[in-house]
Image (tube, rainbow, N blue to C red):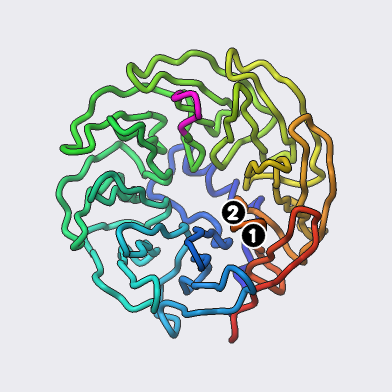
Amino acid sequence: MQKRKITLIGIIAVLAGLLAGCTGTPTPAGWPCSYVGDKAIFTASGAHIYAVNAENGAELWRFPVEPEGAKIFGAAPILVGGQLIAGDYDFQLHSLNPDSGGEIWVNKDATGRWIGSPIAIGDLILAPNADHNLYAINPNGVVQWKFTAKNGLWNQPVTDGKSVFVSSMDKNLYALNPKTGKVLWSVELGGSVMFSQTMGDDGILYIATINKEILAISPDSGKISWKAKTPGTVWEPVVVKEGTLYAGDQTGKIFALSTKDGSKIWELDAGGSAIGGPVLTEKGLFVGTGYVNGEKPGEATLVSTTGQKVWTKEVGGKLYSRPVVSGKLVVFGVFEGDNTLAALDENGNIIWNFNPSK
């Protein structure tokens, strides 16, 4: 598979142009993004969705079988009621059989790229699109309602079970009724949001903006409890656990904040951009790095919850996407490398690599 030569500096420059008022919505990088099922890891990477055996990294199937024109996949798919839902950059949302990769249905209502992953609430699939719309789609692929923001939706929505929350490149966070799409409240964030919102284990919304801030927001009212400045832009969702927020940013800083007031607990220099952000296990924070100048490969890193590096491991490429946990393995998406996925154990040993057959 041909590698897409896209540098992080170039992506940030494109984003800067958008935020300065350019029209249209540019495409973020096509680094691999994954979703973990019971027995397979489903990965969006370039021209395909891949199903990969979670134990040994063997390819189970790919969709489509052969590349199809402008069909590029950049957002992690999700499993919903026996269907694997995946959007592409050719404006199509696909429902696939997770066992075979066969297409069940395709929705062509959107007029923009599917950049952010969908979520499911009940039997509805809520899918954000760069055409400014959040689409609520039933299990048969039919749109039930849509909500329109003032700019593109790149961020995977989150829910507390009562409302659905979606943030936009228009610098606003919206709380919606998941049954109707009606706006319950909205709040201006002071900066655009790419992929960073999360619902903490404390029931509070945490969102990072391109304005180098993290905000804590009440899901009931939209009231901002606190704002904290970050060294660089936080791209991916932060991790919140028992009063501590963990994040990584574009400058290579990994840090912990108090969820009480946003005050800094510790900060670590990872040695390279950490835009994929961390994933938390009982062993600590697993995070991948890439290098803005492109001179060195990225590293998979384990960081303790008190801010010390436990180990680092080069995996032959740049690690820009958030890693995923599959059993006792942590799986990293590899960009501009020899492999697409690298699965490591808790000690930093590479257990398997996935390199799609040409």
Examine the rendered structure and indicate whether residue 239 appears above or below residue 341: above
Please, what secondary structure does the residue beneath circle 2 have? strand
Residue at 66% in and 50% down: 9
Is residue 44 shown to the viewer in this render? no
Say which residue appears at 23% left-offset and 50% top-offset.
123
- The CA distance from mark 1 to mark 2 is 5 Å
Q: Is residue 175 magenta?
A: no
Q: Kindly identify which numbered label has been placed on residue 348.
A: none
Magenta span covers which residues? Answer: 199-204
Rendered location of residue 171, percent (x, y): 41, 30
The residue beneath circle 2 is 324
Whole-percent x, y for residue 317 in the image: 73, 64
Amino acid bearing label 2: Val
Mark 1 nearby-residue class (10 Å; few <14, some 14–19, many ≥20): many
Q: Label 2 near label 1: C-beta < 8 Å?
A: yes
The front one of 243 and 63 is 243
Q: Is residue 336 above or below residue 209?
A: below
Q: Can residue 188 be seen at all in this image of the molecule?
A: yes
Q: Is residue 19 left or right of residue 96?
A: right
Q: Quadrant of residue 252?
A: top right
Instruction: Residue 93: give x, y in percent of width and height.
Output: 31, 63
Type of amino acid under label 1: Val
Q: Quadrant of residue 30?
A: bottom right
**Left of 102 or right of it: where is 107?**
left
Mark positioned earlier in the residue sequence (1 or 2): 2
Q: Which mark is residue 331?
A: 1
